[in-house]
Amino acid sequence: MSRPAIAYINLNHLRHNYRLLTQRSTGANVMAIIKANGYGHGQALIAPVLLAEGCRHFGVTDACEGAQLRKLLAAAGSGEESTIAMLAGIYDKEDAGLATAHALTPAITDSAQIGLLKEAGFHGSVWIKIDTGMNRLGAEQPQLLIKQCHDSAIAVRGIMSHLACADEPDHPMNRQQAASFSSQCRQIDPQLPRSLLNSAGIITMPEEAGDIVRPGLALYGIEPLPAMPVGLKPVMTLTGAIVQVRNIPAGASISYGASFTARQPMRIAVVSLGYADGLPRGLSNKGQAFLRGQTLPVVGRVCMDYTMLDITGTDAEQGDYVEFWGENISAGDVAGALDTISYTLFTGIGERVTRLAV
């Protein structure tokens, strides 16, 4: 580890979250969504812990992520017993080849994808993804796809769809989508397993759990509905080290654009975390960090490699690590201040930030 920028990954909190979500899933199996490098937390850290907890269903974005995950699971001793769903399906023959070689389970939306799998000699299983109102991905002729799967000796694992507004419990679209999903499943094949609920859906619509639920962000400790907390614990704590302490006179400006000017003498900490590490530039002059029970305001613009904090009147010193979100500053609150979502914070953490299990 050369750069003093660390994302601490609390594996006990991950275990807690998985167990809690499993309990709330009313008997459905849990497909842990660990796409985008485990939502930025580090797939290599996350997957073995979930496997040890008994999780046997995982979701990733594409074939490359799936191939990497299969190798991790094999190294952890799961062999081929775990299923890995490719939620974005396949794009080309290379994807089809990886799905075949690593026993992946693509989500299928059109006939061309089945053709690619057939050419690759694929004889595993697929999900049929249908649209219930989100108008993103969805099969227009799911029954035809199922027939083509049968004709190609490809098994159908089940039918899935995705909720658009589950984080708004009273949104009428939730019930509309659930009704559409049930209706389409009955028409397509009432015997096939069903998967509809995401993190928020598990909390607000447990009666729609079906056979498999697909929690993502909730696994990592973000409450899908802050007004309805269920006791999730944050998994990531993002930190950077104070690499220099500066005494700034009144009237001096700080960082690019001179957007902050000291009204009085100040003590400033230069921290080894910037927007290239994933700390949003939008936190310039309005973010904060945490150290030993105190919040420290961000002053000046967040730079590519550094961020400056006001440590006037504190005992902060060079070598201290400060928290930007995690145990003491909620990533959800940080995201809210930026008018974004926690997903963008976690998945934006750069490769040069060390993920360290604790």
Image (spheres, rainbow, N blue to C red):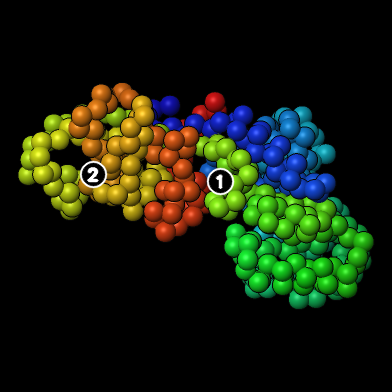
- In this rendering, would 98 be left or right of 41? right
- What's the residue at 33%, 46% (across, down)? 287
Instruction: Give the quarter of the image for residue 189.
Output: bottom right
Tell me if residue 293 comes above or below residue 304 in the rendering: above
Residue count near mark 2 (Cα–Cα under 10 Å), binned few <14, some 14–19, many ≥20: many
Image mark for residue 299: 2
Image coordinates of residue 111 in percent, x first then y, are 78, 71
Image coordinates of residue 177 in percent, x first then y, are 72, 70
- What's the residue at 65%, 38% (across, down)? 17
Q: Which residue is mark 1?
A: 222
Residue count near mark 1 (Cα–Cα under 10 Å), binned few <14, some 14–19, many ≥20: many
Q: Nearer the viewer, residue 319 or 235?
A: 235
**The N terminus lies in quadrant:** top left
Q: Nearer the viewer, residue 53 or 2?
A: 53
Instruction: Give the quarter of the image for residue 19.
Output: top right
Tell me if residue 260 comes above or below residue 329 in the rendering: below
**The C terminus lies in quadrant:** top right
Image coordinates of residue 135 in percent, x first then y, are 64, 73
Image coordinates of residue 51 in percent, x first then y, are 73, 34
Q: Are marks 2 and 1 in contact (CB under 8 Å)?
A: no
Res 119 seen here = no
Image mark for residue 278: none
Instruction: Give the quarter of the image for residue 265.
Output: top left
- What's the residue at 43%, 40% (across, down)? 329
Res 295 seen here = yes
Q: Secondary structure at mark 1?
A: loop
Label 1 is placed on what type of residue? Ile
- What's the residue at 66%, 71% (across, down)? 173
Q: Nearer the viewer, residue 252 or 141?
A: 252
